Amino acid sequence: MFKKILIANRGEIAVRVIRSCRELDIPTAAVYSDADRHSLHVRYADEAYYLGPSKASDSYLRGDKIIEIALECGADAIHPGYGFLAERADFSQACQESGITFIGPKPSAIAAMGDKQVARNTVSEAGVPVVLGTEGQGDLTDEELLKIAPEIGFPLLIKPSAGGGGKGMREVRNLEEMPGLLTASRREAEASFGDGNIYLEKLIQGARHIEIQILADQHGNVIHLGERECSIQRRHQKLLEEAPSPFIGENQELREAMGAVAVQAARAVDYLNAGTIEFLVDEDRNYYFLEMNTRLQVEHPVTEAVTGIDIIKEQIRIAAGQPLRLKQEDIVLKGWAMECRINAEDPFKGFMPSTGTITQSLLPAGPGIRVDSGVYSGFEISPYYDALIAKLIVHEETRNETITRMKRALEEYRVIGVRTNIPFHLALLEDPEFLAGDFDTQFIKDDVPPFSGGQDNQSLPEVAALAAVLAAHQKTQSSAVLIQGGRQATSNWKWLGRWERTTK
Ligand code: MV4
């Protein structure tokens, strides 16, 4: 086993990794930037080393400096978490060359899946279904793409090879508008990724985003841990995830088929460690490989809840060369889990980031509740990193019971000092279509009130219902903010309780 693990990340995920290391009795080293001097991951780790200024490019993206620190402090492994250096083949390579174990896949697998065209070709050759498009044709010019487009058919999507996360993607409805969209997509891809290559795919309408968690060890064992439903997104940012998917539900046959295909896709790139295969699933239950995330994912806890597996411990054991102790038939899904991402942002103002000091953070608790938080009362949220401050994960027997428990937990949750998206989640959990499990990736339409900001829309009945929930919660939050000042912090609870009893 490793002598010491350096965690090349920050926030809730760094804390999460430290917890698993503790339970495995492995000492931890944290790294931090100026803005993170007082962060939770720095407090929880056995040692902490300063990286540099707050900007990610001067701190958490400094792979050279991180490897230097690891060598100096005697860490023999690095856990990258998600984001930052997690999917950089060159960083995985540099670790290897320095004699440090990168807790993740090999550089070759990261690179193969990082190029979306290479990924499509590779998995498609291994028999994995992909959406009809330009696979197997290499990088094409605009002239060639315009010629192929009618064969694929409209509407279609232009996607950047180096993409992911929807950046540079363009929807094309007809040949006439295509030349301009090709230019725009290439320009955005070049600016975002330094790679202007693009390819085409037929647009799948009304699709869900369902992903399969994979574990692969160094002894040729590859298993899957079932699916996660990730269709609830806004501008390609996931907001709520659940396991299992209500679309798959009791359909064990579909789950096993998608799981087997995900294992095939992982094997096609000689995958190692934890990874996720993303699928688009259409209304007729056809599923298509979208991309593979060669890292631990934000939403991994919902899979942990329904499988009972600590995915990070498994990652560490795999990286240390241990064989998986679980076989596919040992994986049994139990109950239902849901995760709400708690972001410091204002859902009433176009989800604008909200920064400042969290004067009070009161976490929900009780049966089936898990909060993975990177903040605490007194913590200052800086504008340098993403808005995720915590993940609220709930586990219960059925989907309905999970939703009831999640609503209870969200109502218990108090964050004072910054705005959060808790009211958004409360409203979502009242939505009839969400409750029925009837939604796709277009479900959150941010051009529609009440989340569009500003416009008056109270005349629409469904929007009025949403707005009522929001208003109630917003009032409790603003009253809490009103009374936050000075030394009165301890009386906030009482005050709030009294306020709620008299006004609700
Ligand atoms: C698609 C698609 C429909 N058809 N590809 C968005 C991000 C990138 N990973 C791929 N994405 C999509 N690719 C075809 N052929 C719809 C999306 C998509 C989407 C996918 C997953 C989750 C949320 C999404 C939101 C909008 C569009």
Image (cartoon, grey):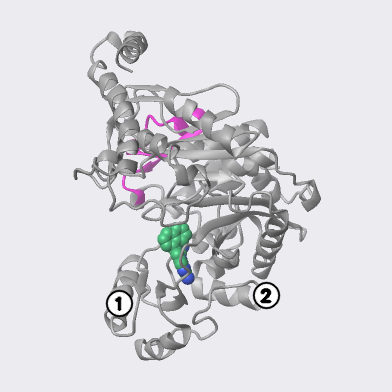
Q: Where is residue 113 shown, x and y percent of the image?
A: 55, 67
> Residue 58: in sight, yes or no?
yes
**Which residue is painted at 29% across and 19% down in the image?**
480
The kind of secondary structure element at disc 2 is loop
Residues in magenta, as a range: 32-56
Say which of 234 and 502 sits in front.
502
- Taking the image in four quarters, ligand 1 sits in the one at bottom left
Q: Where is residue 11 shown, x and y percent of the image?
A: 44, 38
User: Position of 88 compared to 274: left or right?
Assistant: left
Which residue bears the numbered disc 1?
181
Q: Where is residue 248 shown, x and y percent of the image?
A: 63, 53
Which residue bears the numbered disc 2?
127
Q: Where is residue 122 shown, x and y percent of the image?
A: 61, 75
Q: Amino acid at mark 1?
A: Leu
The kind of secondary structure element at disc 1 is helix
Q: Amino acid at mark 2?
A: Gly
Q: Distance from label 1 to label 2 (Cα)?
A: 31 Å
